[in-house]
């Protein structure tokens, strides 16, 4: 497990709070966004940015860790509150993610594989699209449009990392559902926002890439 670098973490938390304010303003202005209470996005973004920079400092993946965290705060807020992932965020996120991965490849060309990232993103998007067609109540089109960005980042690390990110997402989602059922706050017919779990799985794999044993590049 990587050590926590406190100075980058503190600087990241301060910068993250400002980005969180921007996220709150952005979501409030979107037609299918979300109205967040002042301080919520700021605190969440400060936490995820600070933790990401503190844990991934020195890693070639640090830029992707920060970007994945910002996506997590932005999309997670909407999905948790409204059970949707707006196209106005998921679709522009794809070229931005391509750029982030490309810069990572340019700065640290041996950190991963850009070609593998593209192949994995295409394959996983196809799989999730098929799941959404077969089980539309279990997998939404918003999740399908989110997957390319996440798979680009984890796929850049390795095929195993991309698979692990999805596995972690399903495990976290299943755990959330079990807790909800046990507490009787959910029923077997309750909808679960899956976007936050996909985002969490991606973020965790990027922060702890060594968890993906025997990477296949």
Image (tube, rainbow, N blue to C red):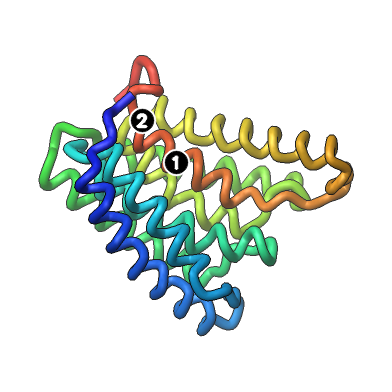
Residue 5 to residue 87: above or below: above
Q: Give how far across and how far down residue 200 sits, in percent.
A: 50, 43
Q: Secondary structure at mark 1?
A: helix
Q: Give how far across and how far down residue 161 sits, in percent.
A: 40, 29
Q: Quadrant of the C terminus?
A: top left
Q: CA distance from mark 1 to mark 2?
A: 10 Å
Which residue is identified by label 2? 208
- The answer to which of 138 and 42 lies nearer the viewer is 42
Asked if disc 1 and disc 2 are in contact, CB closer than 8 Å, the reply is: no
Q: Residue at x 47, y 68 (%)?
A: 89
Query: Residue 216: which quarter of the image?
Result: top left
Q: Give how far across and how far down residue 68 sits, in percent.
A: 39, 51
- The answer to which of 209 and 103 lies nearer the viewer is 209
Which residue is identified by label 1? 202
Q: Secondary structure at mark 2?
A: loop
Please rate how many residues cluster around mark 2, counting C-alpha atoms within 10 Å: few if below 14, some from 14 to 19, many from 20. Answer: some
**Res 100 label:** none
Please rate how many residues cluster around mark 1, counting C-alpha atoms within 10 Å: few if below 14, some from 14 to 19, many from 20. Answer: many
Q: Residue furthest top?
A: 214
Nearer mark to the viewer, of 1 and 2: 2
Residue 212 to residue 110: above or below: above
- The answer to which of 183 and 214 lies nearer the viewer is 183
Query: Residue 116: which quarter of the image?
Result: top left
Q: Residue at x 43, y 66 (%)?
A: 42
Q: Give how far across and how far down residue 13 sits, in percent.
A: 32, 56
Q: How many marks?
A: 2
Q: Earlier in the sequence, mark 1 or mark 2?
A: 1
The answer to whether residue 95 is left or right of residue 173 is left
Q: Residue at x 39, y 75 (%)?
A: 22
Q: Quadrant of the N terminus?
A: top left
Q: Residue at x 59, y 77 (%)?
A: 35
């Amino acid at each position: 497990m990587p050590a926590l670098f406190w100075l980058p973490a503190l600087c990241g938390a301060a910068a993250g709070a400002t980005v969180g304010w921007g996220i709150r303003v952005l979501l409030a202005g979107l037609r299918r966004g979300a109205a967040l209470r002042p301080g919520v996005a700021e605190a969440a973004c400060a936490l995820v940015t600070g933790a990401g920079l503190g844990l991934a400092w020195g890693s070639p993946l640090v830029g992707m860790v920060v970007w994945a965290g910002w996506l997590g705060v932005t999309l997670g807020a909407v999905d948790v509150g409204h059970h949707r992932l707006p196209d106005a965020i998921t679709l522009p996120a794809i070229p931005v993610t391509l750029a982030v991965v490309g810069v990572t490849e340019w700065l640290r060309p041996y950190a991963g594989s850009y070609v593998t990232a593209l192949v994995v993103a295409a394959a996983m998007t196809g799989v999730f699209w098929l799941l959404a067609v077969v089980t539309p109540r279990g997998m939404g089109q918003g999740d399908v449009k989110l997957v390319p960005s996440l798979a680009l980042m984890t796929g850049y690390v390795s095929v195993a990392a991309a698979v692990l990110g999805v596995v972690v997402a399903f495990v976290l989602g299943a755990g959330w559902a079990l807790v909800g059922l046990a507490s009787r706050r959910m029923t077997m017919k309750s909808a679960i926002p899956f976007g936050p779990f996909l985002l969490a799985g991606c973020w965790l794999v990027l922060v702890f890439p060594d968890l993906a044993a025997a990477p296949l590049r």
